[in-house]
Amino acid sequence: TQQTITVIPGDGIGPSIIDACIKVLDKAGCNFNYEYADAGLAAYEKHGELVPQKTLNLIEKNKISLKGPLTTPVGEGFTSINVTLRKKFKLYANLRPVISFKGTRARYENIDILTIRENTEGMYSGLGQTVSADGETAEALSLVTREGAERIVEFAYQTAIKEGRKKVTAVHKANILKSTSGLFLKVAREVASRYPEIESTEMIVDNCCMQLVMNPEQFDVIVTTNLFGDILSDLCAGLVGGLGMAPGANIGQDCAIFEAVHGSAPDIAGKNLANPTSVILAAIQMLEYMGKNDKAALIRNAITDVIESGDRTTRDLGGEHGTTDFTEALLERL
Ligand code: NAI
Ligand code: MG
């Protein structure tokens, strides 16, 4: 049967990179049915809501969504749409792989790092956010549960085995954040002891930032809490040529949303400058999640060939072309 995917084009550069991505999926012969849904500023302007109920229903119904970046208006009364979706659909694992391609602005040649970020707890729990009446004191609750920590670390080891990876590094700040990071590290050590076939290491987050910049080849899988994972994964994107190269998968029990790590890039929106690689790599994650590894490999080979040969690459990759030319080069390969 033909699989239906919920597609959320999103804001800014979203519609153009999603359009490129759908063309690539179709050309690769994926034969999906797509149901389009609004979210973000686009939805707010049309329906007066950032995430209309109809969109939530489609995400729930089809189980698999492909999503462009969403702009959350800054200011009171707007909670982040991405945080809302991750919590609502219990998308507890955020997988953010980065791979270096030759001939790009990647700073190192042999990077293949998968950051697995806990996606529903930690500093982004959304709990206990208060500002005192005089506006002088602000608080927020960081939450780590044994259940949440065990689930994400288990997920990291299972993914490492599935992908033939060798090493898992738990990143924490247990020396200072004794309670929250302390519990995360304790649970990470327990889970690590159940996987003797995988090399387990641990690292304090600030040192990890330095190590990633100085010697990134030492990393394979990184597993960490929400805030650290958010920041480390952007750092990793910088190592391989920028946010245009960084995809992300939000995975829960039976629902998943695939997206680019970057935002709506208002500075380049509408100028045909966006690199669609991030969201196409997210679509590859989606294909692998669905077990369609042959299609995933087909598209990955096309991307590698276009980027490494420098054929019509976008400016962020050091080329001189736009979204549409780059996409055309990909479609020709497929
Ligand atoms: P951003 O990720 O949109 O842009 C940061 C920089 O990277 C900009 O210079 C941009 O031009 C560049 N960039 C991003 N994607 C690119 C691509 N595909 N090709 C070439 N260059 C690219 O971050 P910013 O400016 O902090 O946020 C803009 C908006 O996006 C905000 O409203 C924010 O809330 C939202 N956002 C949404 C996310 C999501 O939906 N997953 C994630 C992060 C931010
Ligand atoms: Mg982020």
Image (tube, rainbow, N blue to C red):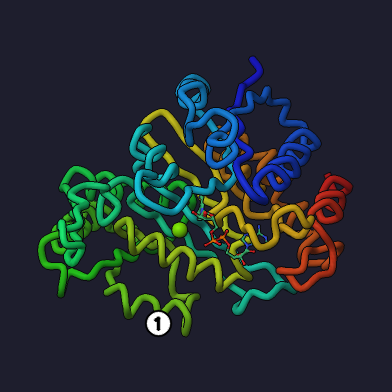
Q: From what the image shows, is residue 111 above or below residue 274?
A: below
Seen as rendered, the residue at the extreme left is 179
* Residue located at (48% from left, 27% from top): 52
The answer to whether 144 appears left or right of 171 in the picture is: left
**Which amino acid type is marked by label 1?**
Met
Seen as rendered, the residue at the extreme bottom is 214
* Residue located at (84% from left, 45% from top): 331
Q: From what the image shows, is residue 281 above or below residue 182?
A: above
Seen as rendered, the residue at the extreme top is 1
* Residue 165 in the image, given as x and y percentages of width and height: 45, 58
Which quarter of the rendering shows the C terminus?
A: top right
Which quarter of the rendering shows the N terminus?
A: top right
* Residue 70 in the image, given as x and y percentages of width and height: 54, 46
- Report ligand 2 position as a quadrant: bottom left
* Residue located at (49% from left, 45% from top): 249
Relative to the observer, which residue lies in front, 46 or 214?
A: 46
Q: From what the image shows, is residue 29 above or below residue 153?
A: above
Q: From what the image shows, is residue 34 above or below residue 23?
A: above
The answer to whether 142 appears left or right of 70 in the picture is: left
Q: What is the secondary structure assignment of the residue under circle 1?
A: helix
To which residue does mark 1 refer?
A: 210
The count of marks equals 1
* Residue 30 in the image, given as x and y percentages of width and height: 72, 31
10 Å crowding of disc 1: few (<14), some (14-19), many (20+): few
* Residue 267 in the image, given as x and y percentages of width and height: 66, 63
The answer to whether 210 appears left or right of 290 in the picture is: left
